[in-house]
Amino acid sequence: MISLYDKDNTGSIEFESFVVIMNQLSKEEDIDEEIKEVYKVFDRDDKGISAKELSSVMTSLMSLKAKHKNDKGITPNVDNEDDKVFDVITEQDAIDMIAESDMDGDGKLNFEEFARILMEKDEKPRNKYN
């Protein structure tokens, strides 16, 4: 990484460049910690995210979203996908979702696979998972 900022190839960098590098590393660590916390919500048995865990958590999250909208007095628009009361994510739905990202073929999402999914949504790479 230092070589990117070592413009005169002396093996050293300016202080301003050092600050930029440290800020980038700090942001990556914050993102890593956030992803780890989210992963723990899904991976309840610490053995990788199973279809049952994924289905349960996602259905719960959708239910909470619907409840939140209802509590705010927002009337669902049946023509708008985002305004549906909530969908139930079946175990088969979860199996299909996992299959798309399960690089090691164990039928579960490990941390790296999960992180890669989350980071795919970003327009530009931010850390080591993509």
Image (spheres, grey):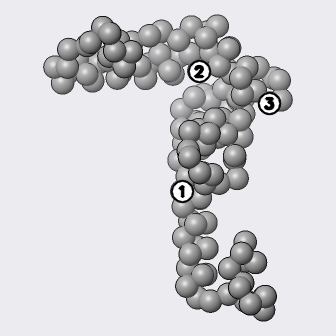
* Residue 64 image position (x, y, % from top left): 35, 21
Query: Under tag 3, what secondary structure?
Result: loop
Mark 3 or mark 2: which comes first in sequence? 2
Q: Is residue 111 visible?
A: no
Residue placed furthest toward the left: 73
* Residue 95, quarter of picture: top right
Neighbor class of circle 2 (other Cα within 10 Å; few <14, some 14-19, many 20+) is many
Q: Which residue is mark 1?
A: 30
Proximity of marks 1 and 3: CB atoms separated by less than 8 Å: no
- Observer-nearest of 48 and 125: 125
The residue at 62%/39% (across/down) is 120
- Which amino acid lies under the numbered mark 1 shown in the image of this protein? Asp
- Which amino acid lies under the numbered mark 2 shown in the image of this protein? Leu
Mark 1 or mark 2: which comes first in sequence? 1
- On screen, residue 119 above or below 8: above
The residue at 74%/90% (across/down) is 8
* Residue 74, quarter of picture: top left
Mark 1 or mark 3: which comes first in sequence? 1
* Residue 40, quarter of picture: top right
* Residue 56 image position (x, y, % from top left): 53, 16
Q: Which residue is mark 2?
A: 54
- Observer-nearest of 62 and 130: 130
Q: Which residue is mark 3?
A: 103
- Observer-nearest of 14 and 42: 14
Q: Nearer the viewer, mark 1 or mark 3?
A: 3
Give the side of residue 120 with respect to residue 72, left or right: right
Neighbor class of circle 3 (other Cα within 10 Å; few <14, some 14-19, many 20+) is some
